Image: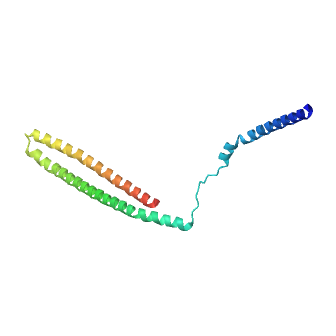
């Protein structure tokens, strides 16, 4: 009786060893499964839309942006008009000051001849003339800067309109 039982135990041991071997083989095969699942997982990068859906979205976007763009263009035009008026005012003021300086030179010589003994008044006029020349230079610089700013804003406006 020991013999049939021994063969049963031996068969059970070999089956157990075979089962352990199968488990280790399966374990090594399934060990990489989480990484494989992640690698093989598909990700949608782009979603395809039907043409009517796309067209309706485009028209809705256009409808929502048009009033805003119109408002912005109006504001830009108003600001450019304001800058143009300011530029014209500065140019007119510069011309006025130039005219005054020219008159001061013409009448200044006659005054200098008539007031031989008044050197204090002549030095004051010279100082005033120097101040006016400095002011003229500053104003001409301001006019140039405003012209350049207006041109730059016009370019930006054209580029933004062209981009749309």
Residue 86, how many percent across, how many down? 26, 56
- Of all residues, the one furthest to the bottom in this rendering is 52
Q: Of residues 3 and 121, which is closer to you in this image?
A: 3
Q: Residue furthest front?
A: 1
Looking at the image, which residue is at 45% across and 61% down? 162
User: Toward which corner of the image does residue 65 lie, by quadrant?
Assistant: bottom left
In this rendering, would 93 be left or right of 42?
left
Kindly indicate the quadrant of the structure image that contains residue 2. top right
Q: Position of residue 53 (x, y in %)?
A: 53, 66
Q: Is residue 82 left or right of residue 158?
A: left
Image coordinates of residue 29 in percent, x first then y, are 75, 41
Q: Position of residue 35 (x, y in %)?
A: 67, 43
Asked if residue 149 is positioned above or below residue 49 in the image, the reply reads above
Residue at left offset 37%, top offset 55%: 153
Which sits in the foreground, 26 or 142? 26
Considering depth in this image, is 119 or 80 the residue closer to the camera?
80
In the rendered image, the quadrant that contains the N terminus is top right
From the viewer's perspective, is residue 24 above or below residue 144? above
Residues 87 and 61: in front is 61
């Amino acid at each position: 009786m020991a013999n049939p039982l021994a063969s049963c135990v031996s068969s059970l041991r070999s089956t157990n060893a075979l089962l352990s071997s199968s488990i280790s083989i399966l374990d090594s095969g399934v060990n990489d499964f989480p990484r494989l699942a992640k690698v093989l997982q598909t990700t949608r990068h782009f979603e395809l839309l039907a043409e009517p859906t796309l067209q309706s979205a485009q028209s809705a976007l256009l409808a929502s942006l048009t009033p805003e763009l119109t408002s912005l263009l109006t504001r830009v035009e108003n600001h450019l008009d304001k800058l143009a008026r300011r530029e014209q005012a500065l140019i007119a003021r510069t011309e006025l000051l130039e005219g005054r300086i020219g008159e001061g030179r013409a009448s200044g010589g006659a005054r200098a001849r008539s007031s031989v003994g008044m050197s204090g008044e002549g030095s004051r006029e010279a100082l005033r003339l120097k101040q006016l020349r400095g002011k003229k230079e500053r104003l001409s610089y301001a006019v140039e800067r405003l012209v350049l700013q207006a041109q730059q804003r016009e370019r930006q406006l054209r580029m933004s309109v062209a981009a749309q």
